[in-house]
């Protein structure tokens, strides 16, 4: 039902492709202009990290137009696990949707919201908080590529637009990710490199996460109320063909209840697996694939109907998979040109010698710029924290705050950077042009950045004891 509507929206994906292509060409130009350089690296706990104070010039490796044509395929190679995850889980969710279980649940949610529009708007903070908890605990990120297949139809059926639908999952998980306390891929890695007790300082980070989630929820709720009063207030009005989801009244049978229970159990397993069993893309993909197949068996869909639904789900996720791979190709070119470490060295040098409060704010903004080239949270931690940690010691900044500056720079700017495969993939699935997303979210980004600066300044000013 919903996958067919997604198909109509992906017609806007060439906008994202053009943006990625332009950035790819600009990165090639940078390999000619930025001096090549490198830090020495060592292995710590099985992860390659930078050795502070070892930056040196490297052999220049300027990229050319031929490299640009090879980069997309190399991007597919580098992002193979995420691309496979998106395609397989997209097919698995199509099986889940085919059972009608999600539709039956959505119908009851929509009817409840229609009876009380004011109360219906409260669905927004509730759902966003759920996804924020996922970002706060196990670093939910790539998973939102799949969940927006549910949140977008939910938002549309309640009278909102795709912006609200994307915000429920992607923005909710994003602010939770930025303020995470137990994310093993960012906080856990950064704490290990900074030699701080893992997941320490969780109390302060919990406050940060709550404030970020509240700010984002209020922003989305305000926008949603405007749409309910006047649909022409949608930022997509006249730019993207409007779609009003009609949720069919499907009986909530025993078999569909079983599917919903399996779905909830799967969500719990994702959280537990990420935190306790080191689950990542492969394991989560296997879990949702098993969920899709089990759902089809419980509802006796039949082999032919199941395969048709699965192929349809995979097909609908192809534009997102393409965007993810091409976004990764930009990083391949930057790495081959040996310019990432040079950019990191230049950024770190800007911070040296400044007052503590000013320095920690600049560390945050520097991490945001570096995140453009290294959107991987754990990858950015491995590359930047070995440099930022000793720098923080020299400046008298607490290591906890240095980790928080990295965390904010990575998490918040993930919401807007065009080199993030998740960001561009989500927008492609939703049919939201990148420039419209930026036009809608920029005010919220200003609010979140200012809040982040306040949270970074408070420990350095001695207002709070960040341990």
Image: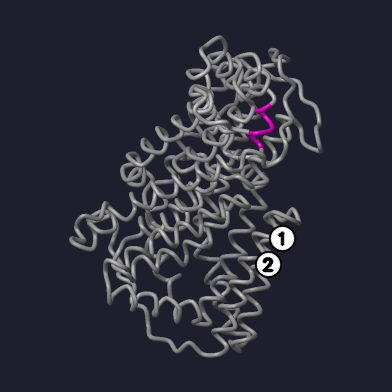
Residues 73 and 339: in front is 339
Residue beneath the point at 54% across and 15% down: 351
Q: Residue 18 at what x, y percent from top left?
A: 42, 42
Task: Judge from the rendering whether residue 162 lies leftward or rightward of residue 329; answer left or right.
Answer: left
Q: Residue 233 at what x, y percent from top left?
A: 21, 55
Q: Is residue 29 visible?
A: no
Magenta extent? 379-385
Q: Is residue 51 visible?
A: yes
Q: Is residue 83 above or below residue 451?
A: below
Task: Judge from the rendering whether residue 213 lies leftward or rightward of residue 89; answer left or right.
Answer: left
Q: Is residue 123 above or below residue 432?
A: below
Residue beneath the point at 74% across and 53% down: 278
Q: Is residue 305 above or below residue 75?
A: below
Q: Is residue 250 above or below residue 320?
A: below
Circles 2 and 1 in contact, beta carbons < 8 Å: yes
Q: Is residue 408 magenta?
A: no
Hey, which quadrant is residue 123 in on the image?
Answer: bottom left
- Residue 287: mark in rendering: 2
- Residue 33: mark in rendering: none
Q: Is residue 384 magenta?
A: yes
The Cα atoms of the two marked residues, 2 and 1, are separated by: 6 Å
Give the structural element (helix, strand or loop) at label 1: helix
Magenta span: chief secondary structure: helix
Q: Residues within 10 Å of mark 1 (few under 14, many from 20)?
A: some
- Residue 283: mark in rendering: 1
Q: Quadrant of the C terminus?
A: top right
Hey, which quadrant is residue 51 in on the image?
Answer: top right
Q: Quadrant of the N terminus?
A: bottom left
Task: Judge from the rendering whether residue 7 lies leftward or rightward of residue 47; answer left or right.
Answer: left
Residue beneath the point at 66% across and 79% down: 294
Q: Residues within 10 Å of mark 2 (few under 14, many from 20)?
A: some
């Amino acid at each position: 039902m919903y996958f067919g509507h997604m198909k109509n929206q992906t017609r806007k994906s060439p906008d994202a492709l053009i943006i990625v292509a332009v950035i790819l060409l600009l990165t090639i130009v940078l390999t000619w202009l930025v001096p090549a350089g490198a830090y020495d690296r060592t292995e710590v706990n099985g992860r390659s990290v930078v050795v502070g104070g070892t930056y040196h010039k490297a052999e220049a490796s300027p990229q050319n137009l031929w490299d640009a044509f090879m980069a997309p395929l190399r991007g597919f190679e580098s992002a193979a696990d995420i691309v496979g995850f998106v395609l397989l889980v997209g097919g698995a969710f199509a099986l889940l949707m085919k059972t009608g279980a999600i539709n039956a649940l959505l119908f009851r949610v929509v009817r409840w919201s229609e009876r009380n529009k004011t109360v219906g708007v409260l669905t927004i903070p509730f759902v966003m908080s759920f996804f924020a908890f996922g970002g706060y605990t196990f670093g939910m990120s790539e998973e939102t590529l799949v969940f927006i297949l549910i949140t977008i139809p939910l938002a549309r059926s309640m009278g909102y637009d795709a912006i609200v639908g994307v915000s429920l999952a992607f923005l909710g998980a994003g602010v939770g990710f930025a303020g995470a306390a137990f994310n093993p891929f960012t906080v856990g890695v950064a704490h290990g490199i900074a030699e701080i007790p893992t997941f320490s300082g969780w109390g302060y980070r919990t406050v940060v996460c709550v404030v970020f989630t509240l700010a984002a929820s209020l922003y989305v709720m305000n926008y949603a109320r405007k749409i309910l009063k006047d649909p022409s207030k949608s930022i997509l009005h006249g730019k993207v063909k409007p779609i009003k989801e009609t949720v069919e009244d499907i009986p909530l049978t025993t078999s569909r209840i079983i599917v919903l229970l399996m779905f909830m159990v799967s969500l719990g397993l994702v959280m537990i697996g990420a935190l306790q069993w080191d689950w990542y893309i492969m394991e989560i993909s296997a879990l949702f694939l098993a969920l899709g197949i089990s759902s089809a068996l419980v509802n006796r869909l039949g082999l032919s109907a199941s395969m048709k639904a699965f192929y349809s789900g995979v097909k609908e996720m192809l534009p997102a998979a393409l965007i993810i791979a091409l976004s990764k190709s930009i990083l391949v070119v930057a790495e081959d040109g040996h310019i990432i470490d040079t950019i990191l060295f230049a950024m770190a040098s800007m911070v040296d010698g400044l007052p503590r409060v000013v320095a920690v704010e600049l560390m945050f903004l520097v991490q945001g710029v570096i995140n453009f080239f290294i959107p991987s949270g754990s990858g950015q931690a491995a590359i930047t924290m070995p440099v930022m940690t000793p720098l923080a010691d020299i400046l008298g900044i607490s290591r906890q705050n240095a980790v928080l500056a990295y965390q904010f720079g990575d998490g918040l700017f993930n919401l807007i950077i065009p080199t993030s495969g998740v960001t561009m993939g989500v927008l492609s699935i939703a049919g939201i042009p990148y420039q419209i997303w930026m036009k809608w979210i920029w005010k919220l980004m200003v609010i979140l950045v200012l809040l982040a600066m306040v949270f970074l300044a408070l420990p350095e000013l001695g207002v709070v004891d960040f341990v």
